[in-house]
Amino acid sequence: MNRREAIGRVGLILGGTIIGAEFFISGCKPSSPKVNDLFTQDDLALMDEIGETILPATSSPGAKAAEIGKFMSVMVQDCYKTDDQKIFTKGLNDLNDASDKKFGKKFMEATPQQRTELLTALDKEQKDYTKTKKPEDPNHYFRMMKELTLLGFFTSKPGATQALRYIAVPGKYDGNLPYKKGDKAWAT
């Protein structure tokens, strides 16, 4: 064996050790790429589906069109306190566990009807919790998810321009603008 072959074999052994360690740590499945310090691409996809279940597409776009998962990840990372970040990220796992317990499958694998049923139950749970919550008690994870979905959607371009009425420059103030029953609310 010459020197080049020896170096090549050592490189192969060391490379295999590094790659093998990654597979050992991750359980032989590739990990989802990180989006920021708290969330992965899989988390974003889950948050998109949660948002789409809360605000589904109808005659106007749904939460997924507003890329609500990206919005949630930025807001939680940049604006939430560390305790609320932990509650939110743990809540994603809790939501999946609740789906697994109730339907025998993760939230992403559940049917739209099952997703709606689960989120309706979680919404009732968070409302009951909020009624009895003391100021020092932690927030409920589903309330945070729902609030971020609504805020993110109605401040996004699809939400403001397609779900609500929108005029980029409304012009003069008209305090006596006629309103017809069933008109969309104004975004501007």
Image (spheres, grey):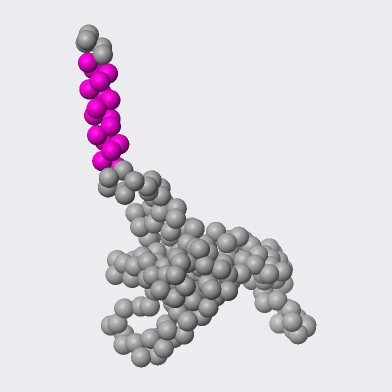
**Is residue 103 rendered to the left or right of residue 90?**
right
Please, is residue 155 above or below residue 28 in the view? below
The percent position of residue 116, horizontal first and vertical second, equals 55, 75
Please, is residue 114 above or below residue 77 in the view? below
The percent position of residue 43, horizontal first and vertical second, equals 43, 59
45 vs 30, nearest the viewer: 30
User: Quadrant of residue 13 in the image?
Assistant: top left
Please, is residue 50 above or below residue 17 in the view? below
137 vs 57, nearest the viewer: 57
The percent position of residue 74, horizontal first and vertical second, equals 43, 59
The percent position of residue 48, horizontal first and vertical second, equals 52, 62
- Which region of the structure is painted magenta? 6-22
Q: Do we see residue 52 in this rendering?
A: yes
Please, is residue 184 above or below residue 12 in the view? below
Q: Residue furthest front?
A: 104
- Residue displayed at 22% across by 10% down: 1
- Residue displayed at 42% across by 82% down: 126
51 vs 120, nearest the viewer: 120
Q: Which residue lies furthest to the bottom in this view?
A: 132
User: Quadrant of residue 128 in the image?
Assistant: bottom left
Q: Do we see residue 153 in this rendering?
A: no
Q: How many marks?
A: 0
- Residue displayed at 31% across by 48% down: 26
**Is residue 176 rendered to the left or right of residue 130?**
right
Q: Does the magenta stretch include residue 175?
A: no
- Residue displayed at 44% across by 55% down: 42
Main secondary structure along the magenta-highlighted residues = helix
